[in-house]
Amino acid sequence: MEPPDWEAMNFTVEPAAPGYPLCEEWKDGSEGSVFHLANIFLFFGFMGGSGFYGLLYLFTFLTLGFFCSTVWAWSDPCTTDSFLWNFALFGVCLGQVLHVSYRLRSVSFEKDFQELYLCMFKKLGVSLTHFGKIVACCDGDIHTIEPDHCFAIEGKTAIDKLSVLLSGRIRVTVNGEFLHYIYPFQFLDSPEWDSLRPSEEGVFQVTLRADNPCRYVAWRRKKLYLLFAKHRYIAKVFALVVRNDIAEKLYSLNDKAFDKAGRRYDLRLPSYCHMPGTELEKADVFLQVPVQGERTA
């Protein structure tokens, strides 16, 4: 038996060609300005914030970034998958831009309510969505008061709403004595509102009269409490702004409170239990003080 011919049986198996091209060497040039511009847009886009304007900023830059990536992928015939993915993401982001723009337009308000939002609610971080519910609670109505007409009369007008002055000036008096003024973006009836429970009823203890043409927005008591029951966040916001308004009114009254001797009272002290003296009363007190060396009866 002849031995096998090992040399004839010896063969070399060639390696199979890889299914994807290998990177044999680095490219000398960059990918091009469109590729880098796409990544710059994506970088700025992911720095967007929250809220409607933050979402609009975010998806606008993402749309531009994926559009540039789509153009870059289209220029290379070997990147079909990259082109399809970038084009799909571009379409999704463009749809989000249109959707957020529509929602942002749907919560736009009239000039008076826009100013009310900027002056009272925006600084507290209230979103436009929540403010839209607040505006809807008052039906978007603006009320007017002619000069020398009363918003409330002491002992007669029922406390059935909460109101904010938008323009003009309101004079507050009690028993004919001047207390203080109410200026735009201050509550007209915050002390009365805070003094009653939801189930209680009451009447104004002061008179509110317009010094000039005034405009205000009012929320009906029952509708506002229903809104508070549905949205606890809005209830906390109103509690904060109402009590802050009361504190400002108390401090304004504190500058006008004098006793019979001309000494200033502090309204924050529990011993204060009477109305502040008028300028005429204070003048009478100082006129009655005898001058040194003068004879008295």
Image (cartoon, rainbow, N blue to C red):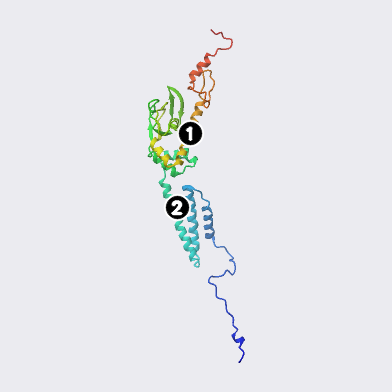
Q: Is residue 134 visible?
A: no
* 208 vs 192, nearest the viewer: 192
Q: In what element is the residue under mark 2?
A: helix
Q: In what element is the residue under mark 1?
A: helix
Among the two numbered marks 1 and 2 on one chain, the one whose residue lies closer to the N terminus: 2
Residue 243 is labelled as: 1
Query: What percent of the width, then of the height, locates residue 240?
Result: 48, 36
Q: Nearer the viewer, mark 1 or mark 2?
A: 1
* 70 vs 46, nearest the viewer: 46
Name which residue lies at 59% across and 85% down. 9
Amino acid tagged 2: Val
Above-or-below relation of 64 to 79 = above
From the image, tell me which residue sits under label 2: 97
Name which residue lies at 48% across and 47% down. 51
- Compute the Cα span from label 1 to label 2: 39 Å
Q: Residues within 10 Å of mark 2 (few under 14, many from 20)?
A: many
Query: What percent of the width, then of the height, locates residue 79?
Result: 50, 66
Query: What percent of the width, then of the height, locates residue 130?
Result: 44, 43
